[in-house]
Amino acid sequence: MALPPDNIIIKRSKVISHTSDFNADDNDMDEFKQKSLHKKTKYKEDILPQLSNRQTQIIGVFLALFSLLILIALLSYTSKDEANADIHLQDIFSIIKGDQDIQAKADTTYNLLGLFGAVLADMLFNKSFGFISIIFPFIGFIWSKELLFNDKVSLQSIRSTSYILLFSLIISAFFGTLSLLVPQIRIEWYGTIGLFQANIYSSLIGKFGSLLLCIVAGFITITLGLNITLHTAISTLSHYISSLFSWLRTFFERTHSQSSSIKEIKNKSISFNDTYQQQEIDNNEEPVQIVKRMSTITQHSDDMQRHMPVIIRGNEFNDSDDPGIILAERPRKNTSNLTFEEALAERSVFKPPVEHKEEKKASDSIQIDFTNEATQPSLVLNIQETVLQSYDLPPKDLHHYRMMIQDEKIKYSPPNLDLLKKQNEHVIKVDDAELKENARLLQEKLLTFKITIQDLTVTPGPVVTQYEFVPAAGIKISQIENLSDDIALALKARGIRIIAPVPGRGTVAIEIPNHKPSLVLFSSIIKSSKFHDSEHRLSLALGKTISGEVYCADLSKMPHLLIAGSTGAGKSVGINTVICSLLYKMHPKDLKFVIIDPKKVEMTYYGFLKNHFLAISPDTDEHIITTPQNAVAVLKSLCVEMMNRYEILAKVGQRNIVDYNQKVKEGKYKDSGTDHSPMPYIVCVIDELADLMLTAGREVEEPIIRLAQLARAVGIHMIVATQRPSVDVITGLIKANFPARISYQVASKIDSRTIIDGGGADQLLGNGDMLFLPGGSPKPIRIQNSFLSTDEVENICMHIGNQQGYSKPYMLPTSIEKTTGGSSLIDDSRDELFEEAAKTIIRHQQGSVSLLQRRLKVGYARAARIMDELEAAGIVGSFDGSKGREVLLNNETDLEALL
């Protein structure tokens, strides 16, 4: 009977033994959980547990270095680098491959870290959070410090970084919303992310609601980031606000007491000595600082190897390593001929973003740099957006109409280089062997006619090469001029041009075409520093000279330009390059165009510029003038505009538009009792004068001559082109008032003499090869016009036209004298077609002059007079811009009752 208890005891012990095993397992499980929790906590506290201490410190050093580079890039940011920074980061490495465009951008970058710093700063400021991004390098410094000294980044640093990023988002959204209310705020304050948030928030809860949301969200973020309660934050904020108001109250009380003391002093009598001393103080003004410009003096050696060809290359072709060729650079003419008074009156012109290409200078050139003591800030175009109001005013109140248009602030982005074709191919260089061979053949051919030459100089260009030499003593110039055909035969050239003598050099030059000419693209001219840095008021990018140099001219100094050339010579392309160079350089508020295109197809793309760059006459119903009648009307409107401007200048005592605009900007006429606004330049472009002279004749010639004689001082300039430069088209009066002329290839020497007063234009090559005769110059300059395709013109016009322009186009004054009222219009003075015209207008319910021209088969002038009679009789309404007049009568019964 003793066995069962033993068995029971044994089983119990087993049970106890199992229980102890379970307790041991629980202890192991708790220890495992604690270790896992410790590992998780350690992982949360250290984001780099898998790295050694040395690796962590290396990462910290690199993080500190990268943060320092970012800080330097942001601190040296300037808006001048925006054009250069408009590339991707991977494009920077194209410099290693020798990309000339990227290299040119790098050479003209102002950022201390070069092109990389400019791209990085532009990305952080303009394309992310704005100026608040300056805090990011300091976050990097904090993280690098913890990695260097603690081998880990603490949870507190991660938490603070998240709050700082959230606060940056809120700040950028705040300034982005504020920019919608104040367009003058630049994009650097909020960046693309801030503008994106502002557009979303303002579309949901409005602009003011978005501002309130940003303020509240920023306040909450600050309290959470500083780990304080809302009560403490509100109490602290209230304390600071009350302190600010107390300081302001004290400041205004002190200012009021000081102003009262000053009034008491002014009421007392002032002695003679006090007055004299006050005058001395008032006259103690800072002297005007004269800006000294950089000038280049080029020295040339006089010891030249005689009777041997010396090749002189331009800048673009100066990369030969042939020891037998002497590389030098011609002395260039200094185009900065502005006087001090003109420099002060120089108006601000808009400069688009371009690429500066650094020019190579010869080893024997000496450069003297006069540094300016007071550097003036460059003009920066702020892209602003504002809601435009619609001003529905009649043209009779033209002055107030223009004042309202001038007061509008438009969002305007200039055309960029991406709209143009880039020169992908390498520039075709003239082979040195070909140059030497041509020089040898030229010497031999001249020797056969007993003409000895000295100091032969060869200057290769993109299309032609100039061979310049000094004739030996006793050689007549006429002997060389008569050998053009013989030299062309010996050199197997298409046509050569002889300049005998070269003005101011005492040499003779022979221009010979290259076997493989290079294409000069418009983009290569626009991105050049010569075009971008030119001080011309109306800069025209004409092309490249025979030495490969960019040539620009100032239309305001010409002051009018006459262009001639046969069909297919490049005349239309030249006109497009002239117009587009002005579009790249000018702002819509400073320039307006009047475009007359009798061909009806050449200038259609410029119609997209209606509310930006076009000036429209109320006497026409076209934006781009295509009919001779409308051409006459718009030219007469320009004459009226010219006289109106002269009257304004006479009232204020100014001689030209430059001085007047400068005084208006300085606010000199605010107290004159009359509203004054800056006058924009007006450029009238006539594509085909021959057709207008054939159809309108004297009616067209008279306003053109009048504008050419008088319009320069008031900023109205003309560009007239024709494909038939005969004396019946380019009359003596027109030619006398157009001193600056361009001639493309023409059919005969007679046409060449008509346009440029000399031969040579008949020997041009076509395809943009032209001779430019500046005003007052004895000999023309040979230039290869840049090529601008139709697609590029369309891209430029669409880029401008798709932007928000002025609410109304720039309106010219009418040239038609209107009657003063209906009572003064009696039946005897009405046109005999008055009643028929009234019925036509009522029948079609369309009050336009062109309708009367078509239906009644009358000219524009008579149809316009009939329309004025209809308005005076109360049949049609007043003029409403390009729209048709409102017809006030519904049917012919009402007309019979009125009559």
Image (cartoon, rainbow, N blue to C red):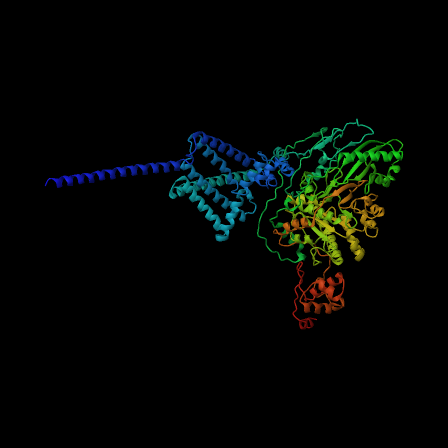
Which residue corresponds to the image point at 66% horizontal and 56% vertical from the top-left? 397
How many numbered badges does the structure rendering display? 0
Q: Is residue 203 left or right of residue 391?
A: left
Instruction: Locate residue 450: give its quadrant.
Output: top right
> Where residue 879 sits in the image (x, y, percent)?
67, 60
Q: Is residue 21 above or below residue 674?
A: above
Where does the image place residue 839, in percent across and percent down from the top left?
70, 69
- Tell whether 265 sits left or right of 440: left
Q: Position of residue 787 (x, y in %)?
A: 71, 45
Q: Nearer the viewer, residue 800 or 842?
A: 800
Foreground residue, 780 or 289?
780
Where 852 falls versus 402 (above or below)? below
Q: Could you say which is closer to the camera, residue 720 or residue 513?
A: 513
Q: Is residue 830 visible?
A: no
Which quarter of the image is occupied by the N terminus? top left
Residue occupying the far top of the picture: 303
Q: Quadrant of the C terminus?
A: bottom right
Q: Position of residue 89 (x, y in %)?
A: 57, 39
